[in-house]
Amino acid sequence: MSAHNLLDDIERVLISAEQLQVRVAEMGHQIRNDYDGREGEMILVGVLKGALMFMVDIARHIDLPLSIDFMAVSSYGASTESSGIVRILKDLDSSIEGKHVLVIEDIIDSGLTLSYMLDNLRSRNPATLAVCALLDKKERRTAEVKVDYVGFVVPDEFVVGYGLDYNQLYRNLPFIGVLKPELYSS
Ligand code: IMP
Ligand code: MG
């Protein structure tokens, strides 16, 4: 094994593992209170792969009967900019018609991916459709989308960890950090 340490690639920690856990629990409890007592089924739709860690953590704080499903979409190549082209790589396993759908996303950047996904999901006639994002890179928004639950607003920097990747790496860091710029400037 090489002596390469993931931490060596991180310029600074933006949100610590502890801060993430506290905020995710808070969000889960808020969602629980908001959805409690609704008629009909609730389903969490996680957007792969970035929302994976957030999904499994927040789901455990929403003390309600619910099902979970995943969707995979691609708007990114290997670069750090949204192309605006969204493809469904993996669709939901079951129908969301008449259900209370809560989309779980890692980060909203331009909003293009989410905007496309919401149009697509809306056409399947859910009872309600809402969005819960861990991170919001507000200054970069170009598509108009309503995000119902936001964990943290982050500055316009490329972040990795807790599910978020750069070229498929760094998802397994337990915190959200900023990559050393020299690692993606080339
Ligand atoms: P959007 O379509 O520009 O909003 O891009 C959203 C998607 O791009 C997110 O779901 C992430 O997968 C990815 N993304 C955007 N910003 C970052 C970042 O800073 N780090 C890692 N992935 C990001
Ligand atoms: Mg994503």
Image (cartoon, rainbow, N blue to C red):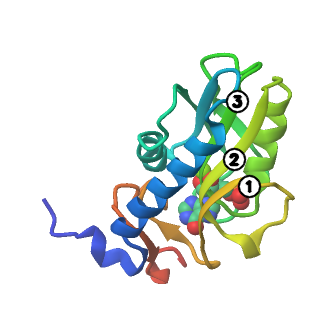
Residue 161 visible, this angle = no
Residue contact between numbered discs 2 and 3, judged by CB atoms under 8 Å = no
Identify the mark nearer the N-term, 3 or 1: 3
Dots 1 and 2: beta carbons under 8 Å? yes
Residue in view at x 76 percent, y 63 percent: 110
Residue 168 image offset from top left, x and y in percent:
45, 53
Q: Secondary structure at mark 1?
A: loop
User: Which x, y percent locates residue 166?
Assistant: 49, 62
Structural distance between the alpha carbons of marks 3 and 1: 15 Å
Residue 131 is marked as 2
Q: Nearer the viewer, residue 158 or 22?
A: 22
Which quarter of the image is occupied by the N terminus? bottom left
* Amino acid at the residue labelled 1: Val
Q: What residue is at 47 percent from the left and 65 percent from the top?
A: 160
* x then y, percent, for residue 141: 79, 67
Q: Residues within 10 Å of mark 2 (few under 14, many from 20)?
A: some
Label 3 SS: strand
Can you say whether 70 is above or below 6 in the image?
above
In the image, residue 75 above or below residue 95: below
Rendered location of residue 47, percent (x, y): 59, 41
Point out the frontmost of discs 2 and 3. 3
Q: Judge whether residue 39 can be spotted in this image.
A: yes
Which residue position is annotated with label 3?
Answer: 100
Q: Which residue is mark 1?
A: 147
The quarter of the picture where residue 177 lies is bottom left
Q: Residues within 10 Å of mark 3 (few under 14, many from 20)?
A: many
Name the secondary structure under disc 2: strand
